[in-house]
Amino acid sequence: IGDNGVRHITEALEDNNTLTVLIMYQCGLSAKGAACIKKMLTQNATLKALYIGDNIIGDNGVRHITEALEDNNTLTVLIMYQCGLSAKGAISISELIKINQ
């Protein structure tokens, strides 16, 4: 679906109050799509699990996600694998874990 499709989905989920799990494996998501997810996560208070494996969001994409999760108290499951992260991206995740304990 690519970043454009992700944008449409995340815009719809900004005001969602029913969907609790979002699975987007291998959908062509990049850092641009991760920025759309960031915006949605700052407004959505229902989503509990986000699966975005097999999307090359890279370090910039993971930074978008972790910034959003600093203030999001409802998402409790985040699955990211094969996302093109380097040590820099891993550091962003580890810092988020320290904040959200």
Image (tube, rainbow, N blue to C red):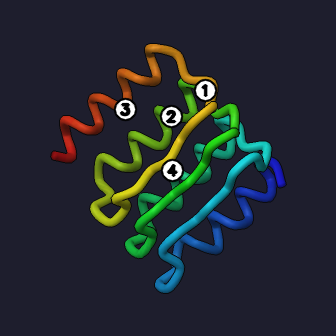
On the image, the x and y values in percent for residue 78 come to: 45, 50
Task: Give the CA separation, mark 1 to mark 3.
Answer: 12 Å
Quarter occupied by the N terminus:
bottom right
Q: How many marks can you see?
A: 4
**Element type at mark 1:** helix
Q: Quick one: label 2 or label 3, which is nearer the N terminus?
A: 2
Q: Quick one: label 3 or label 4, which is nearer the N terminus?
A: 4
Residue at the disc numbered 4: 38
Task: Give the CA separation, mark 4 to mark 2.
Answer: 10 Å
- Is 15 located above or below residue 37 in the figure? below
Q: Nearer the viewer, mark 1 or mark 4?
A: 1
Q: Quick one: label 4 or label 2, which is nearer the N terminus?
A: 4
Label 1 amino acid? Gly
Residue at the disc numbered 2: 62
Q: Are discs 1 and 2 less than 8 Å apart at CB?
A: yes
Residue at the disc numbered 3: 93
Label 2 amino acid? Val
